[in-house]
Image (tube, grey):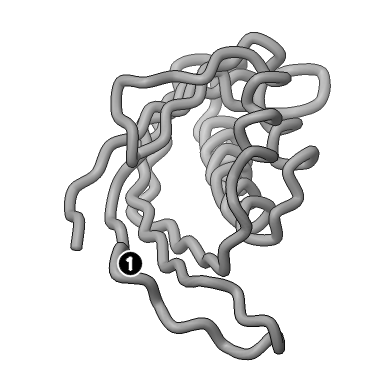
């Protein structure tokens, strides 16, 4: 693999992580779940070691969330390319959340905001592009 090919994989995988955050904040659950492989595992930072297994179950878990106003920021993304079809990544994620207001105004942040955590990802190249095979998360700081 050339350096240019490795850098292209790193960029594609980092884009996948950022796209996931944007789709999650927009509550576009079908598109968010589609970023996982059919047999993927997802572990939320707020529930380390507990996994939802399979894309359909991940979609159901997203849809079961109560409505909330939220914004995630992601940083410190480091992608390690294993080969042309496999990579691992680490990222830090911060969640700001609040209760939606009936008038559509700005929500006040909840007492549990912000949450600061991380993800360790296993990424695979599929016919549809790079996808999450596993997202395992944990928390660094809780309010």
Residue drawn at x 69%, y 29% as measured from the top left? 60
Q: Is residue 25 above or below residue 1?
A: below
Q: Quadrant of residue 2?
A: top right
Total numbered badges shown on the rendered structure: 1
Quadrant for the N terminus in the image: top right
x and y percent of residue 12 in the render? 63, 40
Residue drawn at x 59%, y 51% as measured from the top left? 66
| Label 1 CA crowd tier, 10 Å (few <14, some 14–19, many 20+) | some
Residue at mark 1: 113
Between residue 53 and residue 11, name the one nearer to us. 53
Residue at the outermost front position: 102
Q: Quadrant of residue 82?
A: top left
Q: Quadrant of residue 143?
A: bottom left
Q: Is residue 40 above or below residue 61?
A: above
Residue drawn at x 33%, y 32% as measured from the top left? 47
Between residue 33 and residue 98, name the one nearer to us. 98
Secondary structure under tag 1 reads: loop
x and y percent of residue 138 in the render? 28, 37
x and y percent of residue 87 in the render? 48, 23
Between residue 104 and residue 52, name the one nearer to us. 104
Q: Is residue 117 left or right of residue 14?
A: left
Residue drawn at x 41%, y 68% as measured from the top left? 96
């Amino acid at each position: 693999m050339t350096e240019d090919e490795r850098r292209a994989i790193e960029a594609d995988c980092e884009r996948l992580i950022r796209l996931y955050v944007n789709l999650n904040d927009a509550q576009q659950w079908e598109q968010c779940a589609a970023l996982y492989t059919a047999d993927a595992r997802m572990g939320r930072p707020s529930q380390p070691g507990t996994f939802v297994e399979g894309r359909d179950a991940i979609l159901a878990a997203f849809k079961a969330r109560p409505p909330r106003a939220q914004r995630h920021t992601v940083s410190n993304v480091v992608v390690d390319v294993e080969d042309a079809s496999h990579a691992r990544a680490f990222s830090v994620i911060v969640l700001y959340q609040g209760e939606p207001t009936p008038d559509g105004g700005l929500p006040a942040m909840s007492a549990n905001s912000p949450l600061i955590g991380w993800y360790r990802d296993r990424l695979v190249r599929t016919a549809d592009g790079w996808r999450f095979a596993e997202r395992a998360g944990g928390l660094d700081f809780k309010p």
